Amino acid sequence: MTPDEYGEFHVDRVSGDEPLLPARVHRPADLLRLLLGIVGIALVLLLATFAHGTTQGLEDDIGTGAKAAPQLLINLAGLTSSVLVLLVPVAFAVERLIKRDGLRIADGVLAAVLAHGVSLATDLWVAEAAAPSIRDALTRPLESGGLTPPVHSYLAPVIAYMTAVGMSRRPRWRVAMWFVVLLDVVAVLVGRYTTPFAIATTLLIGWTVAYGTLYAVGSPNVRPTGQNLLAGLRRVGFRPVSAMRAEDVINPDHPEHADRGRRYIVTLEDGPPIDVTVVDREQQAQGFFYRVWRRLSLRGIHQRRSLQSLRQALEQEALLAYAAIAAGASAPKLIATSELGPDAVMLVYEHIGGRTLDSLADEEVTDALMHSAWRQVKALQSRRIAHRRLVGDALLVDRSGNIVLTDLRGGEIAAGDVVLRMDIAQLLTTFGLRVGAERAVAAAVEVLGPDAVADGLPLLQPIALSRTTRATLRQRARERAKREREAVLAASEATKEAREARATEGSKDRKTLRAERHAAKAAQKRALEEASEEAREEDLLAQIRRQVLLVRPTAVIEPAKLERLSPRILLSWIAGAIAVYLLLSQLTNFDLGDVINKAQWVWVLVAMFFSALTYIAATMSLLGFVTEKVSFVRTVIAQIAGNFVKLVAPAAIGGVALNARFLQRAGVRPGLAVASVGASQLFGLGSHILLLLVFGYLTGTQHTPTISPSRTVIAGLLTAAVLVLIVTAVPSLRKFVVTRVRSLFAGVVPRMLDILQRPRKLIMGIGGMLLLTAANVMCLDASIRAFGGGGQVSYASIAVAFLAGNALGSAAPTPGGLGAVEAALVGALTFSGLASGTALPAVLLFRLMVFWLPVLPGWLAFTYLTRKGEI
């Protein structure tokens, strides 16, 4: 019991199971500032490389102006700043220690120490390893013959200290500190002891190290506790008795409660209980990067500001609460707001008892309940108010069975048509996940009417839904795929058992057995297709569209274009930048002019021809395992685009994913598309191994009088045997491999059986694989001949070099096997007898033809197919 200012006693009790707040928190905003600081330093160094002449003119102007200033004044400014730049931080530390805020001072001292170390490391790097242009931009010669320091090792720690201790939040200290820093900067610039680039680098290093330190060790947690809440309620006229965390009662582990504020149910001495939401800076930071990405990637949709002040958050939620009630919707009534210190605010609502929609069983979600929810949405939309988060935990079912809309802080007033229709799409999906598409659509149509529901169909797409809804839809998609895979496996097993049972019957003549085997293969194919078709289900969004089309057949179902920037586009630009960098880095390893002068251009054109031929061969090897009709020209374009995809993924992964996606968009069913690509890859792997063994054997017999395989072949076989033994000996690996192989053969083997019944397709596929290998080998041979290496190595040795390098490139995790392929090819050709001076430029020319030159056409093809919806 504690007395208040009037001498009355109140019970200060908070729920005993209220979770303890951590002493320190890691703020995403600190991480963002760290990244911005690193980018800033990189930009300064880049400008120092390319704009040194401009800054040299600025330095000369500063020097000319300094001559007009009295030397005594310059010396006095330098002396004053050098003293105050250390005295002001010490004074601030003493003031904080007196107020028992030593943790902040400790953070500042740690940041200062780290900034000093980074400064010394930067000085050493500039002196020993930096480019001359950077050294010239960050230093200037002294009269004594030395150079000025590129980074001021006393100023960077001061900047780091003042940033880490939070001096920017205290106006008087902030003004004093920045005055001293600017005085010091002017003194060293006028005195010609530094350069503008050195000053900018020093400030950025201090700023970056400070925020890196704060993010690494965490900032002191100033979030208010339950006791602070009770004290704040008494300040606004309430007489609280106890408070209990609402999440402890409703849903303690919900993943999205973190960014919605802490909620309390507070019991008062007189009157009904109240609901209180506490929002602090740490909770505001939750989902920061997600909101930034949504602002960048979505067009035409207003997103909540990523960095929003507490005052703005308070005003937005209060405005939405008042607007919802004024519109006639059922929402908690806001009765008070207040600050809880400088880093938190609270909103007080009338208490509404009930349960969230997520906590109800499926049979409790009745049509009347859904009608109530749709009436609330209709009321909001009549005043152009968007809720923006109509998920299960934001729909509260009160004691009378009606829906109350909660969690309005992310809403929007004066909302546009797109955002309003997003609410309809979201609520349709929310109810569809619980009761099915038919009942969800029927309830919406009964309240809103068919036209309003049909208008929401273009927004019925995953990107327009909430994170939790998208996660649930993905989980259901995985479950559907698992059921389909299990059905196909069961059907395959059943047909296998039936075939074995027929095989055990009495002996028959050869013609009868061949006819029965042919009939068994056809029956197995039909059984697998039927099992796959029966197991295939429409996803929920497709079911909702179909139900809406039943009541409004003319509805537009084409998804609206909401994405401004997709991960695929972002990866494309990043991959392009990486490709340019890697190409330039490789070209710096040798004299390009000398190589160009030595190259025989006739053979260069021959190499280019065989490089182009590989795309025709790749198209044949893919379409040879596809029974459906697919455009040959579009497939060639897809193979060209695959060369660009290699930049962002290993060759074996990127090509498979692209081809599977292309076949699906070309009309081949997903299971059959994956099976076709898998069959092509499986045949390709077998032919690759067979050719490697054959050419390796021939290579080994070229230099020996007896027919004996080479050591490379023997070593490869022994390595493969050891790997097989390891996989079979370790139970977890054995189970993993068996599971993967079973799922692969469930679709691939039936596709292979289907292809075997079509000799033309089989010849086309195998011929394409052989042509692909032959074209690459001839391209490599032409590259060798372009530098005078013709006749030095045999075709068998060139084939072994290519096959080994290609296998290593497929296994390497680098994009396109970069680095691994070049090293393997040069090593194999040199080992075969080709001079190293010829092998290196020949390999680089070969990689230029088959990897680098197709990058730009690949990017154009990738962009073209993406815009046409082919991938």
Image (spheres, grey):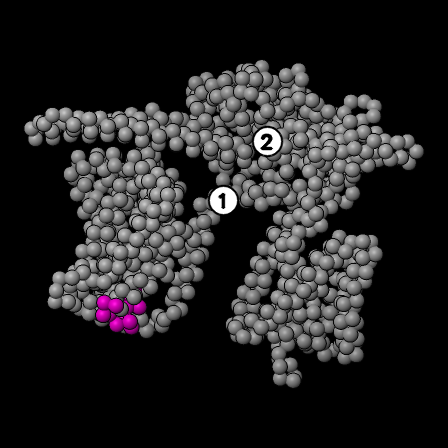
Residue 251 shows in this picture: yes
| Amino acid type at image mark 2 | Arg
Quickly name the residue at label 1.
565
Q: Residues within 10 Å of mark 1 (few under 14, many from 20)?
A: some
Report the number of numbered marks: 2
Whichever of callouts 2 and 1 sits on the residue coming sooner in the sequence is 2
Cβ–Cβ below 8 Å for labels 2 and 1? Answer: no
When the figure is inspected, residue 202 is found, relative to residue 504, above or below; the finding is below
Quickly name the residue at label 2.
389
Q: Nearer the viewer, mark 2 or mark 1?
A: 2
* Residue sitting farthest toward the bottom: 144
Q: Residue at x 26, y 68 (%)?
A: 831
Q: Secondary structure at mark 2?
A: loop
The span shown in magenta is 831-843
Image coordinates of residue 529 in percent, x first then y, are: 28, 28
The tag on residue 203 is none
Q: Is residue 598 magenta?
A: no
Q: Residue at x 50, y 31 (%)?
A: 472
Q: Is residue 839 magenta?
A: yes
Q: Residue at x 29, y 43 (%)?
A: 635
Q: Nearer the viewer, residue 414 or 410?
A: 410
Image coordinates of residue 496 in percent, x first then y, are: 24, 30
* Lateral position of residue 676 relative to residue 296, left or right: left
| Amino acid type at image mark 1 | Leu
Q: Residues within 10 Å of mark 2 (few under 14, many from 20)?
A: many
Image coordinates of residue 520 in percent, x first then y, are: 18, 28
When the figure is inspected, residue 593 is found, relative to residue 720, above or below; the finding is below
The C terminus is located in which quarter? top left
When the figure is inspected, residue 310 is found, relative to residue 528, above or below; the finding is below
* Lateral position of residue 18 relative to residue 251, left or right: right
Q: Nearer the viewer, residue 11 or 816?
A: 11
Q: Quadrant of residue 288?
A: top right
